[in-house]
């Protein structure tokens, strides 16, 4: 099997996409989030359409639980599933590692970019 045919690759792309990382990071703070609160948290970063698509993809993969409350106006909440918490923990750990190693990474970039 070629790596391009690997089902894990598609899942990796969902989790590590720009918007997937951001949504999982915000949801990793715990509890349930209303869509409007998520949208406000990511304001000026992601469009409503992209946030909706990202959440649907993460829900399909089993990382996010979508809870629709039977009220008017519609009330939808999102929360991480146990699977989503596991993925988010790895992403948060990677973000902390990058933050801790940012000076060394910047130096490497400067060395690479200098003539």
Image (cartoon, rainbow, N blue to C red):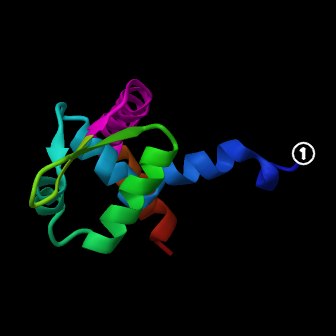
Q: Which residue corresponds to the image point at 47% horizontal and 37% vertical from the top-left?
A: 62
Q: Position of residue 100 (x, y in %)?
A: 29, 36
Q: Residue furthest right?
A: 1
Q: Quadrant of the N terminus?
A: top right
Q: Position of residue 18 (x, y in %)?
A: 40, 60
Q: Which residue is mark 1?
A: 1
Q: Which residue corresponds to the image point at 67% horizontal and 42% vertical from the top-left?
A: 8
Q: Which residue corresponds to the image point at 31% horizontal and 63% vertical from the top-left?
A: 51
Report the predominant secondary structure element of the magenta stretch. Answer: helix
Horizontal side of residue 12 vs 56, given as left or right: right
Say how many tags the image has. Answer: 1
Q: Please tell me whether residue 36 belongs to the stretch shown in magenta.
A: no
Horizontal side of residue 30 vs 1, given as left or right: left
User: Considering only vertical position in the picture, is 22 above or below 47?
Assistant: above
Location of residue 92 (image quadrant): top left
Of residues 9 and 109, the one nearer the viewer is 9
Of residues 21 and 40, the one nearer the viewer is 40
User: Considering only vertical position in the picture, is 12 above or below 17?
Assistant: above
Q: What residue range appears in magenta?
A: 79-102
Q: Position of residue 47 (x, y in %)?
A: 27, 73
Q: Which residue corresponds to the image point at 18% horizontal and 37% vertical from the top-left?
A: 32
Horizontal side of residue 41 vs 87, given as left or right: left
Of residues 107 and 11, the one nearer the viewer is 11
Q: Please tell me whether residue 84 belongs to the stretch shown in magenta.
A: yes
Location of residue 91 (image quadrant): top left
Q: Secondary structure at mark 1?
A: loop
Mark 1 neighbour class, 10 Å CA radius: few under 14, some 14 to 19, many 20 or more: few
Q: Position of residue 5 (x, y in %)?
A: 80, 52
């Amino acid at each position: 099997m070629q790596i391009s045919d690997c089902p894990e690759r598609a899942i990796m792309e969902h989790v590590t996409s720009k918007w997937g990382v951001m949504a999982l990071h915000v949801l990793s703070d715990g509890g349930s989030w209303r869509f409007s609160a998520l949208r406000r948290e990511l304001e000026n970063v992601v469009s409503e359409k992209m946030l909706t698509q990202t959440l649907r993809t993460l829900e399909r993969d089993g990382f996010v639980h979508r809870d629709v409350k039977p009220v008017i106006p519609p009330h939808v909440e999102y929360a991480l599933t146990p699977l989503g918490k596991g993925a988010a923990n790895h992403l948060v750990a990677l973000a902390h590692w990058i933050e801790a190693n940012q000076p060394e990474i910047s130096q490497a970039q400067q060395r690479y970019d200098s003539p």
